[in-house]
Image (cartoon, rainbow, N blue to C red):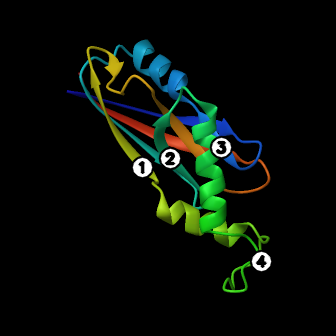
Amino acid sequence: MRQLHTAFVITSRGKGLYDFTDEVARWLAVHRAREGLLTLFVRHTSASLLIQENADADVRGDLERFLSRLVPEGDALYRHTLEGADDMPAHVRAALTQTHLSIPVRDGALVLGTWQGIYLFEHRQVGHRREVAAHFLGD
């Protein structure tokens, strides 16, 4: 049994979903990871991680629009506004989604469904440099 660690850097351009499945798959291939478990963890409080459909971009747009309706910016409820009107809603959105993923690896490949991809979900209006820590445990 061995362990591998790295960090993926995703530069967002503002709100939306950013697919980084291929980067993860390449990293596993370079290190000849065959069987085990991959854990991904986003190191930020205003972004999250999702496994979501990668075939139809409308799905990603619909998710963004739904969360924007569910957690609107500029709500008088929020006290934390020091970093802008989009910051507290971004924290709420991250709390409602996921900050880590566990993905099985079998025969050297991510065990994802046919239409699934790994996404960073940026919840801020302005682009950010996001870091996703990765840990593989297996053979």
Between tags 3 and 1, which lies in front? 3
- The Cα–Cα distance between marks 2 and 1, rounded to whole angstroms, is 6 Å
Vertical position of residue 89 compared to residue 4: above or below: below
Secondary structure type for disc 4: loop
Q: Nearer the viewer, mark 4 or mark 2?
A: 2
Mark with earlier residue (4, 3): 3
**Which residue is label 2 attached to?**
49
Residue placed under numbered mark 4 in the picture: 82
- Which amino acid, mark 2? Leu
How many discs mark residues in the rendered view? 4
Front residue (pair 91, 54): 54
Residue beneath the point at 56% across and 30% down: 20
Q: Is residue 19 left or right of residue 72?
A: left
- The amino acid type of the residue labelled 1 equals His
Label 2 packing within 10 angstroms: few (<14), some (14-19), many (20+): many
Horizontal arrangement in the rendering, residue 40 relative to residue 77 (left or right) = left
Farthest-out residue, left: 1
Pick whichever of labels 4 and 1 is earlier in the sequence: 4
Badge 2 or badge 1: first in the primary sequence: 2
Q: Which quarter of the figure is the N terminus placed in?
A: top left
Mark found first going from the N terminus, 3 or 2: 2
Gap in angstroms between the C-alphas marked 4 and 3? 28 Å
The residue indicated by pointer 3 is 61
Q: Are marks 2 and 1 in contact (CB under 8 Å)?
A: yes
* Secondary-structure class at tag 1: strand
